Each structure stands twice: as structure tokens, then as C-alpha cells.
Amino acid sequence: MAPATDTSAATPGIGLLCLCRQGFEPELAGELTARAGEFGFAGYARTQRNDGYVLFMCDEAAALSRMLSWRELIFARQKLVVLAELPQLDPADRITPMLAVLGDAPRFGDLWVEHPDSDAGKPLSGLSRAFGNALRPALRKAGKLTDKSNEKLPRLHVVFVDGTHAFVCVAAPADSAPWALGIPRLKLLPDAPSRSALKLEEALLTLLTTEEREALMKPGMRAADLGAAPGGWTWVLTRQHLRVLSIDNGPLRQHVLDTGLVEHLRADGFHWSPEQSLDWMVCDMVEQPRRVAERMATWFREGWCKHAIFNLKLPMKKRWDETRLCLELFEEQAGKSLTVRAKQLYHDREEITVLASPLR
């Protein structure tokens, strides 16, 4: 794995702050602990259930961040290097201590003021917006913020976890989510056959870079959608101008068929196989995750597809353990060298979405 972009801002950082879905803090803590250990970094996770974030304490946080690409973290919506934790802010003056902790840090190219996407965090959205409007001119006056957004420079993040407790963080624009809170704001279009369309749209934005999408999603490519009804994922693929074999015994929405890009085959998507190799296979079927991982591996081992995006429905307990087991099972049985990325997406529920591709 190639190291991620440098996120150091004249400081090693005191830890990593990663945002996640409320309730998935144990999974993210387990992932960060395991990944840090793989790279030889000592540290520990500090979190509470339903906080919507995990703080991974590490004396070499910036160096660890360089090894942990945001796009390759499964349960993290956003990845930030913590410059300082301010647990006792005075509501009458939150700006002065923030300017003080920046010290000799270089200029930043942008400022985001955020909060966790949790029951406790959502009420902080008004404070975050108002404080951002107050902090920006103060940062510019102190020479800490460019007049216009500059993605070539580190981005400053202030994350409020309550009205008097905030983390001052830094992120590299090239190695962090490009959306506030790590959540892409996607709109469900009126002609989308189902809300599941948002899952695939988010997966394409999150698991692939812009350059990778342009290279791997070309008009005229051929794809299979396993368990397609009522056609949400098929519809997303047709919007990319792919030709789609939609496999499901159930019906598809008529306007999806009317695109002229879809052939509906009434068959069991879990057991169907193509007569010739396809560019893409996508699958969002409700099935045991290990069975799905094994079936997806068969598609690659048999050469039925070049690239795939599929969902793994996770159990209520030991989700991190099941995630590791399923991904290891898939990679072992696929029979070829693949890049595998997975994310617990905003539009996912108790599941993760996996990309598998020979891209390097």
C-alpha cells in the first residue's frame, strides 16, 4: 500500500480523530488499533458507544496518518490528525485558545468547523456554523488562513463534541473525505427506483478517485447487477452509460428497462453466471456475509468480471471480526491479486460496501 499524503503541520500530532456512524465506535476502534499495530505504532483508542467518533491516542499521529489512507479505512468517515484537545473552552472566548495552540503551524488552505453525526453532536450544527464565521477572519488576521480555499495546503478542522469541548485538527485534502462530517450530500432523484441507488452512488464517490472512476466506468462497458429488483443499482450504472444484465426473479421498474441499456434476466442472482467475461459486477443481496464473500470470490476466480462492488451485511455483534474474516476469505479465494477497499457508507445500514479491482 502506498503511503498516504503528508498531514503533518509542524507537529507530530497527539492522536487521530476519526468520525464514524453512531454505534460503530467499537468497530472503528478495533480497526485503528489493528492497523496501527500492523505498521508498528503504539497507541490506544479512546471512545464511548454512540459518540460518533474515535480518538486514537498516538505520539506519532502524523506519521501513522501517512500510513493509513482515508480511502482504505473501513469504518472511518473522516480521518484527522489532532493538534490539540481543548476540553474546557470558555463560551465567551473560544477563539483565543485556538489561535494559541496553532503556535508556529503554517497557513491552512481552508477551515471546516464540524461535529460528530450523533444524537449529542447534531445539536452543535448551529454553533459550528456560527463559530466558523467568527474564526475565519481571526485566522486570516493572524496569518493562519488563506483568503481563498487552497487544496494544496493542509485543511484546518475544529470538531466540537460539546459546547466547551473541541478538537483542533489538520487534514490533507488529498487524503481525507472531501465532505463536511465525511458525509456526501446526495439527493435521491425522483426517477431513482429505490433508495439503495444512493449506496452505489456513494460507493463510486468514496471507493474510487475521480481518475479511477473515469478510467473504470466508461460508456459501453458491460455489467451485471445481481439481485437487481427493483433496479436501483442498475439505474445508477445506466447513468454511467454502462450496458447492464439485471439478474433477479423480481420485476424491474419500467423506466429502467426503457433506457435501452438493460437486459432483465429472471434468475437467481446468487447462482447465475455470465456466458462471457464482463467489465463490472455489482451485488446488494440479503445473504450471509461469508456466503456473499465466497460467491464474489468465485466471480473473480472464474474470470467472470474485472471489477466488482458488493455489500456484506454484518451481524449485530463482533462486526469488526466478521469484516476481517469475510475480506480475508474473499481475497484468499479470489485467486488473483486485487485491490480491495471497503467502507461503512453513510447510506449503508448494518453493512459495508466493498470494491474489488485489479487497479494498483
Image (spheres, rainbow, N blue to C red):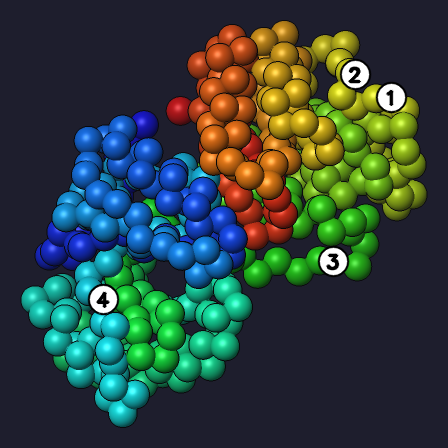
Badge 3 or badge 4: first in the primary sequence: 4
Q: Identify whether 165 is placed above or below 209.
A: below
Which of the numbered marks, if any, corresponds to residue 267?
Answer: 1
Mark 3 neighbour density, 10 Å: few (under 14) some (14–19) many (20 or more)? few
What amino acid does circle 1 point to?
Ala
Q: Which mark is residue 85?
A: 4
Q: Which amino acid does label 4 sit on?
A: Glu
Q: Distance between the residues labelled 3 and 4?
A: 41 Å
**Which quadrant of the structure image shows residue 314?**
top right
**Mark 2 to mark 4: distance in Å?**
53 Å
Q: Say the numbered circle drawn on residue 189.
A: 3
Q: Which mark is in front, 3 or 2? A: 2
- Nearer to us: label 1 or label 4: 4
User: Left or right: where does residue 35 sit relative to residue 284?
Assistant: left
Residue 118 located left or right of residue 260: left
Residue 10 as seen in the image, left or right of residue 355: left
Mark 1–mark 4 Cα distance, whole angstroms, equals 55 Å
Identity of the residue furthest to the bottom in this view: 92
Look at mark 2 in the image and give the residue it sits on.
Answer: 272
The amino acid on which the numbered mark 3 sits, given as a three-letter code, is Leu
User: Picture coordinates of residue 37 (x, y %)?
Assistant: 25, 32
Q: Nearer the viewer, mark 1 or mark 3?
A: 1
Whole-angstrom CA distance, mark 2 to mark 1, is 7 Å
Percent of width and height locating residue 117 = 49, 63
